[in-house]
C-alpha cells in the first residue's frame, strides 16, 4: 500500500470510530486535534486499525506513537 | 525521620557533599548508600529485606526476559514466564504486606455471618517504606523490558538504586526507567542553578506542608466535633479544609522530593500540573498524581483492552447491541477495573474503593451524556470566563466528594458526612439556616479561635493563587525562579518567617505523617 492509500483508509476508520465525517487526517494529526480522541477511545481506535490493516501493534508501538505519521510509518513497513 | 525533619536535611547534606566530591563514577553508589540509610532511619529497618528481594527478583527476571527476547519467536513463552514470575513475587509481597488485614477482616466478617461466631483475624506485618510506589515502578520496568520499550539494566547496584532512590520513597512519583533510571545512570556535575532551584522548591514544599497542610489538618476534627454535628457551615468547611490540606500536603511533598532530587542534578517526573484548574474530573486526573494515573492506564487498562476477552466482548456486543455499545461498554468495564485499583492502591478499605468507583461513575456518566451537553452548550460561548469558572468549581466539588469518602475509614460515616455537607443548604428552612449561622458565630469564639479561622482563610487564598500560578507558570516555585536572586532569598525568608510563627510544630508536636506517605 502506498502512504496515500494508508492515510485514506485510516481516515475512513477514524471517521467511523469517532462518528465524524469532517475528520481529515494529516501526518501531523495528534490526539489533541480530534475532540473525542482521548485515552478512553485510544485502544478502540487502535483495535479497529489493526483489524482493517491486518497488523497487530506491539505495546511499544501503541504507547510510543506520537502522531498519525508515525502510525503510517509502522503500517507502511508492515503491511 | 520524615522529609520535613532536620535530620533528613543533615543526611541529605552529608551525601550531597560525598556525591560531588567523590569521582563521578561512584555517584550511583553514594545515592544507593543514601537510600539505604534513609530507609533504615525512616522505616522499619528489617523491612529493607522486602525491597531488596523485589529489586533482586526484578533485576534477574528482567535480564532473563532480555535474553529470551533475543531468541525472537522461540523465546516469547520464556520471556512471558519470567515476567509473570517476577510480577507474582512483587505483587504478592505488596498484597501480603499491605492488604492482608483487609482480606482477613472481610473473610472474618463473612465467616462470622455464616457461622454466627464473631471472629477477628489480623496479622501484624509492617510493610516496607514506599512499597506501593516501588512495586508499581518495578512492575512498569518489567513490562517495559518485556515490551521492548527499555533494555534491562545489567548492573544490580544500579537497578537497586532505581528501586530505592530515597527522595521518592515517601510519596513517589512512580517513574519509568527511561526517565529516572537513565538520569541515575548519568554522571552529574555540581550546578549552582540546580542548587538554587532545588532549595527554592524545598522551602515552598516545607511551607505548604507545615504552615498550610498541618494547620488545616488540626482544624478538621474541630469542624467535625460532636458539639457542632449537623450545623451547616462546619461539615462544608471541614470538606474544603481537607481538599486544600491534601493538596498542600501532597504537592508540598512533591516540591520537596523534586527539590532534593534536583540538588543531585536529577529532574523527577512531573506529578502535578495545576489540577484545580481542570474543567472536568477526567482532566483533573490527568493533572493530579499524574504518574499513578499513567501507570494504571498504560499497565492495567490498555493491556486489558488488548486481551482476547475484551475483543470477544466487543464483538458480542456489536452483534447484540450495535456499534456504539461495542465501542463504549468494553472500555467502561476496563475503566471500572482501573478505578477499583486506583481506590485500592490508597489502602485496604472499602472507603477507598468507593472513592474510586465514584470517579468512574462521574466519568462514565459524563461520557454518556456528552451528546446532551453538546446540545445544551451550543447556545452559548463555552470559553466564556463564567462557564470556565463554573466547570472548575464543579470539578473541585466532584473531587471533594471523593475526598470525603477518602477521609472517613467507615463508608457509613463518609456517606453520612456527605449528607450533612450537602443537604442543609438545599433543604433547610430559612429559620434553621439562621440558627446554624448563630451556632457558627458562637462556636468560632470558643472551640475555634478567630485567629485560626483567619489562618484558614489565608490558606484558601494561597491555594487559589497557587492554582493560578500553576496554570500560568508551573507553580509557585517555578514562578519565583524567574525573579532576581535577591527577591527569591527575600521571599524564602518571608515564607520561613511565617512558618516559624504559624507552622504546626513545637514541643510535643511531630509533623503529621504525609497523607500519601501512608500508602
Image (spheres, rainbow, N blue to C red):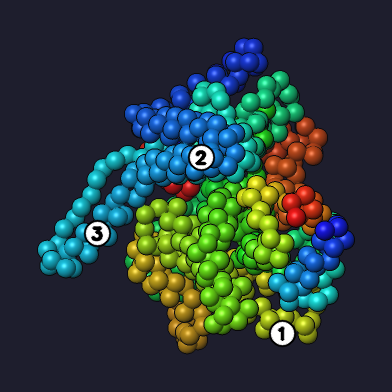
Q: Give the image location of residue B393, x and y in percent.
A: 63, 69
Answer whether residue B175 is visible to the viewer in this image: no
Of the two numbered discs 3 and 2 on the same chain, state the one appearing first in sequence: 2
Label disc, if present, on residue B79 of the rendered structure: 2
In percent of width and height, residue B273 lies at: 67, 52
- Give residue B84's position: percent from left, percent from top: 44, 44
Query: Relative to B516, is B26 above or below?
Result: above
Q: Would you call the spot at circle 3 few (<14 residues within 10 Å), some (14-19), or many (20 or more)?
A: some
Q: Does label 2 lie on the same chain as label 3?
A: yes
Name the disc covering residue B107, or none. 3
Badge 2 and badge 1 in a common chain: yes
Secondary structure under the numbered disc 3 in the rendered image: helix
**Label 1 element class:** helix
Badge 1: residue crowd in 10 Å (few <14, some 14–19, many ≥20): few
Residue at image position (77%, 49%) is A77
Q: Single out the mark in the foreground, 2 or 1.
A: 2
Calculate the distance from the C-alpha at mark 3 to the C-alpha at mark 2: 35 Å
| Image depth: mark 3 or mark 2 in front | 2
Q: Which residue is drawn at 65% across and 47% down?
A: A60
Could you confirm whether marks 1 and 3 are on the same chain? yes
Amino acid at each position: 500500500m502506498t502512504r496515500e492509500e494508508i492515510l485514506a483508509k485510516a481516515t475512513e476508520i477514524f471517521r467511523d470510530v469517532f462518528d465524524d465525517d469532517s475528520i481529515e487526517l494529516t501526518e501531523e494529526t495528534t490526539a489533541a486535534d480530534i475532540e473525542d480522541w482521548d485515552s478512553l477511545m485510544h485502544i478502540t481506535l487502535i483495535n479497529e486499525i489493526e483489524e482493517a490493516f491486518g497488523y497487530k501493534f506491539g505495546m511499544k508501538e501503541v504507547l510510543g506513537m506520537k502522531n498519525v505519521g508515525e502510525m503510517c510509518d509502522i503500517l507502511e513497513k508492515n503491511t | 525521620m520524615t522529609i520535613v525533619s532536620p535530620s533528613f536535611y543533615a543526611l541529605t547534606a552529608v551525601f550531597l557533599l560525598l556525591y560531588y566530591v567523590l569521582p563521578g563514577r561512584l555517584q550511583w553508589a553514594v545515592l544507593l548508600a543514601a537510600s539505604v540509610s534513609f530507609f533504615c532511619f525512616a522505616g522499619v529497618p528489617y523491612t529493607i529485606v522486602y525491597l531488596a528481594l523485589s529489586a533482586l527478583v526484578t533485576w534477574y527476571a528482567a535480564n532473563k526476559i532480555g535474553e529470551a527476547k533475543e531468541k525472537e519467536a522461540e523465546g516469547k513463552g520464556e520471556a512471558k514466564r519470567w515476567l509473570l514470575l517476577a510480577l507474582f513475587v512483587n505483587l504478592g509481597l505488596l498484597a501480603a504486606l499491605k492488604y492482608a488485614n483487609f482480606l482477613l477482616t472481610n473473610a472474618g466478617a463473612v465467616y462470622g455471618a455464616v457461622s454466627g461466631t464473631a471472629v477477628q483475624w489480623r496479622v501484624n506485618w509492617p510493610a516496607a517504606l514506599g512499597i506501593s510506589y516501588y512495586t508499581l515502578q518495578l512492575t512498569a520496568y518489567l513490562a517495559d523490558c518485556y515490551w521492548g520499550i527499555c533494555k534491562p539494566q545489567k548492573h544490580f547496584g544500579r537497578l537497586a538504586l532505581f528501586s530505592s532512590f530515597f527522595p521518592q520513597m515517601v510519596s513517589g512519583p512512580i517513574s519509568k526507567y527511561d526517565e529516572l533510571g537513565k538520569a541515575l545512570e548519568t554522571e552529574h556535575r555540581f550546578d549552582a542553578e540546580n542548587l538554587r532551584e532545588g532549595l527554592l522548591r524545598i522551602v515552598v514544599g516545607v511551607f505548604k506542608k507545615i504552615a498550610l497542610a498541618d494547620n488545616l489538618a488540626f482544624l478538621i476534627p474541630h469542624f467535625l466535633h460532636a458539639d457542632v454535628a449537623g450545623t451547616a457551615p462546619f461539615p462544608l468547611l471541614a470538606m474544603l479544609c481537607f481538599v486544600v490540606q491534601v493538596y498542600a500536603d501532597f504537592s508540598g511533598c512533591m516540591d520537596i522530593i523534586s527539590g532534593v532530587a534536583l540538588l543531585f542534578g536529577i529532574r523527577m517526573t512531573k506529578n502535578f500540573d495545576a489540577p484545580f484548574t481542570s474543567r472536568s474530573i477526567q482532566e483533573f486526573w490527568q493533572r493530579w498524581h499524574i504518574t499513578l494515573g499513567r501507570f494504571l492506564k498504560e499497565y492495567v487498562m490498555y493491556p486489558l483492552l488488548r486481551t482476547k476477552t475484551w475483543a470477544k466482548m466487543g464483538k458480542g456486543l456489536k452483534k447484540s447491541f450495535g456499534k456504539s455499545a461495542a465501542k463504549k461498554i468494553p472500555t467502561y468495564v476496563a475503566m471500572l477495573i482501573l478505578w477499583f485499583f486506583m481506590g485500592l492502591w490508597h489502602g485496604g478499605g472499602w472507603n477507598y474503593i468507593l472513592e474510586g468507583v465514584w470517579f468512574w461513575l462521574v466519568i462514565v456518566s459524563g461520557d454518556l451524556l456528552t451528546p446532551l451537553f453538546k446540545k445544551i452548550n451550543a447556545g452559548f460561548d463555552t470559553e466564556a470566563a463564567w462557564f470556565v469558572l463554573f466547570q472548575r468549581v464543579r470539578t473541585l466539588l466532584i473531587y471533594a466528594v471523593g475526598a470525603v469518602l477518602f477521609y472517613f475509614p467507615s463508608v457509613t460515616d463518609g456517606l453520612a458526612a456527605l449528607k450533612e455537607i450537602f443537604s442543609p443548604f438545599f433543604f433547610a428552612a430559612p429559620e434553621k439556616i439562621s440558627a446554624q449561622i448563630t451556632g457558627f458565630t458562637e462556636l468560632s469564639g470558643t472551640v475555634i479561635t478567630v485567629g485560626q479561622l483567619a489562618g484558614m482563610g489565608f490558606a484558601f487564598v494561597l491555594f487559589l493563587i497557587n492554582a493560578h500560578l500553576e496554570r500560568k507558570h508551573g507553580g509557585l516555585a517555578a514562578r519565583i525562579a524567574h525573579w532576581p536572586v535577591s527577591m527569591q532569598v527575600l521571599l524564602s525568608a518571608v515564607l520561613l518567617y511565617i512558618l516559624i510563627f504559624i507552622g504546626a510544630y513545637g514541643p510535643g508536636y511531630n509533623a503529621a505523617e504525609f497523607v500519601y506517605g501512608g500508602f
